Image (cartoon, helix red, strand yellow):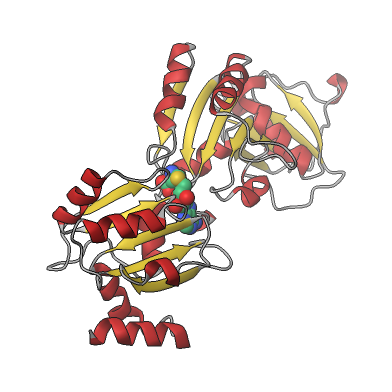
Amino acid sequence: MQLSIDLTGQHVLVTGAATAARQAIKRYESAGAVVFHLPVPAYLGPGAGLPARPFLVAAVDDGQPGWEPVLSRYRAAGVPVASEPAAGAAGHVTLVGGGPGSTDLLTLAALKALRDADVVFYDRLAPYQELPVLTTARLVDVGKKPGHHKVSQTDIQQLMVDAALAGNNVVRFKGGDPYVFGRGGEEVAACVAAGVKVQVISGVTSAISVPAAAGIPVTHREVSHMFTVVSGHAPLTADEHRHLTGLGGTIVVLMGIGTLHQLAAGLRQAGMRADMPMAVVERGYRPGQRTTFANLGTITSAAAGCSNPAVLVIGEVVRVAAANNGHAQATAEFDLLAASLLGS
Ligand code: SAH
């Protein structure tokens, strides 16, 4: 996390071994401080080029014994001593689920991993705009480069592994949850194959949270006791349409805008009712969030103007949203649709 205080020109002494202190040093430098670094627990004072009375001592807990007398000496001189977390050991990869796009939906573990990172490879479904305030790490956009094709999955994995082998704490910052259509499994496998330590921090998946942003619970007592999360990246088979229809629960489709037409036709063909409620929730938790309510028979034309990222929800739970949120999200369009869904 960056410091939100302006320390321009102030002398700050960071204490602690280099590896543990490297991120605290960056934090204070980026807050404008003139940073001095004391890596070993010995009072070196002015003779060694360190200020006797810095503005602040930032004491990194590096696990070495012997810091207390040094810090006491500064305290006795009236210098405030702030304790700082140590940066983690270098050279590993953490896949971090970034949630659907709002920093409010990051986990504490995600924040900690970002704070400890030296380099972050991100794509654009995660709340990437906020990264500069959450980390001092080098930020690398692997989702899209202006004027370029996006970086291939193999290249992303190579970049991560190389950065970790060079001794960096690498965060791979992904939208939603790394293991839900996020290629997290492949990235873990690439790290394991290269002998790089890797861990995964779960995130809030858009499959549940984006319907929720529109007031749609994916399960609801006596309405739906299961939900199936499907990728719409490629059209489903006739068998899959039949199985989904047979389940009778909620269907949540990610990456489904491009194949919406085939999905609606396929489910109809498999016998799903034309008046089955549906919703398309675009840009959940972001500016321009929009929900389109329709039913299976009307969705193709109702959602003609919809674009990615969007989550589709099919099932009676959509009616629950209409019942619960009619007043909370009132728009003329919503009222009309809610009324038609509730009245039918
Ligand atoms: N791992 C991610 C999903 C990656 S697939 C997760 O768990 O959420 C990308 C798809 O996720 C998008 O095409 C869209 O269907 C959905 N998605 C992700 N974020 C979204 C958002 N903020 N609003 C709407 N859909 C979103």
Residue 256 in the image, given as x and y percentages of width and height:
42, 53
Residue 314 vs 255, above or below: the answer is below
Residue that appears at 40% across and 40% down:
181
Residue that appears at 26% across and 74% down:
320
Please state if 133 lies on the left or on the right of 197 as rendered. Answer: right
Pick the front one: 195 or 268: 268
Residue 252 visible in the current orientation: yes
Pick the front one: 72 or 320: 320
Residue 158 in the image, given as x and y percentages of width and height:
58, 19
Please state if 262 lies on the left or on the right of 98 as rendered. Answer: left
Number of dots carrying numbers: 0
Residue 307 in the image, given as x and y percentages of width and height:
53, 60
Residue at the left extreme, as displayed: 222
Residue 56 vs 106, above or below: the answer is above
Residue 106 visible in the current orientation: no
Q: Specify the quadrant that holds the C terminus.
A: bottom left
Pick the front one: 152 or 201: 152
Pick the front one: 266 or 16: 266
Q: Quadrant of residue 281?
A: bottom left
